Image (cartoon, grey):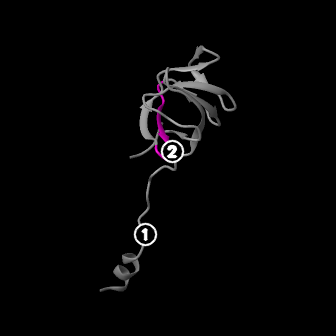
C-alpha cells in the first residue's frame, strides 16, 4: 500500500447534514381540539415542515394552522406563545424542530 493511500484510509468523510435546532417547546396540549401551545424561540410560518420529538413523541407534519389568542396568524415570532394544530398527541416539554432546508 502506498503512503498516499495509507494517509487517506483513516480520514473521516465530510458530512453535509444540517444540525437541527429547536424552533419551539410545547408548554400545553389540548387533546379535544388537538392543539399544542408553543413557546417560540425562532420564527414559524404556515407551510413550514416541522418535526415534533419528545420521550414518547416522534412525528413530522406541515404547519397548517397557527393561532394567537384564537386569532389565525401566518407567522409566529420568537418570544410569542402560539397554538399549533397537531395530528397526534404531544406532551409538554416536547421539542419542535424546523425541517425547512434540512437535508436527508
Q: How many marks?
A: 2
Name the residue furthest top. Answer: 71
Quarter that holds the N terminus: bottom left
| Range of magenta residues | 47-56
Depth order, front residue of 19/4: 19
Looking at the rendering, which quadrant does residue 5 occupy? bottom left
Would you say 10 lies left or right of 80 here?
A: left
Residue at x 59%, y 41% (from the top left corner): 93
What residue is pinned by disc 2?
A: 54
Depth order, front residue of 93/20: 93
What residue is pinned by disc 1?
A: 12
Tell me if mark 2 has few (under 14), some (14-19) or many (20+) residues whose alpha carbon lies within 10 angstroms of its own.
some
Q: Position of residue 94 (x, y in %)?
A: 55, 41
> Residue 72: within the magenta?
no
Residue at x 48%, y 26% (from the top left corner): 63
Q: Earlier in the sequence, mark 2 or mark 1?
A: 1
Residue at x 55%, y 41% (from the top left corner): 95
Q: Secondary structure at mark 2?
A: loop
Q: Position of residue 26 (x, y in %)?
A: 58, 35
Where 4 sits versus 63, above or below?
below
Q: Position of residue 57 (x, y in %)?
A: 46, 41
Q: Secondary structure at mark 1?
A: loop
Would you say 81 lies left or right of 57 here?
A: right
Where 91 sits versus 3, above or below?
above
Amino acid at each position: 500500500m502506498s503512503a498516499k493511500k495509507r494517509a487517506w484510509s483513516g480520514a473521516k468523510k465530510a458530512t453535509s447534514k444540517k444540525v437541527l435546532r429547536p424552533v419551539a417547546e410545547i408548554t400545553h396540549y389540548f387533546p379535544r381540539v388537538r392543539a399544542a401551545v408553543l413557546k417560540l424561540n425562532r420564527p414559524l410560518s404556515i407551510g413550514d415542515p416541522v418535526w415534533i420529538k419528545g420521550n414518547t413523541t416522534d412525528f413530522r407534519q406541515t404547519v397548517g394552522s397557527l393561532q394567537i389568542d384564537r386569532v389565525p396568524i401566518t407567522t409566529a415570532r420568537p418570544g410569542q406563545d402560539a397554538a399549533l394544530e397537531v395530528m397526534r398527541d404531544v406532551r409538554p416539554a416536547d421539542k419542535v424542530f424546523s425541517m425547512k432546508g434540512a437535508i436527508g
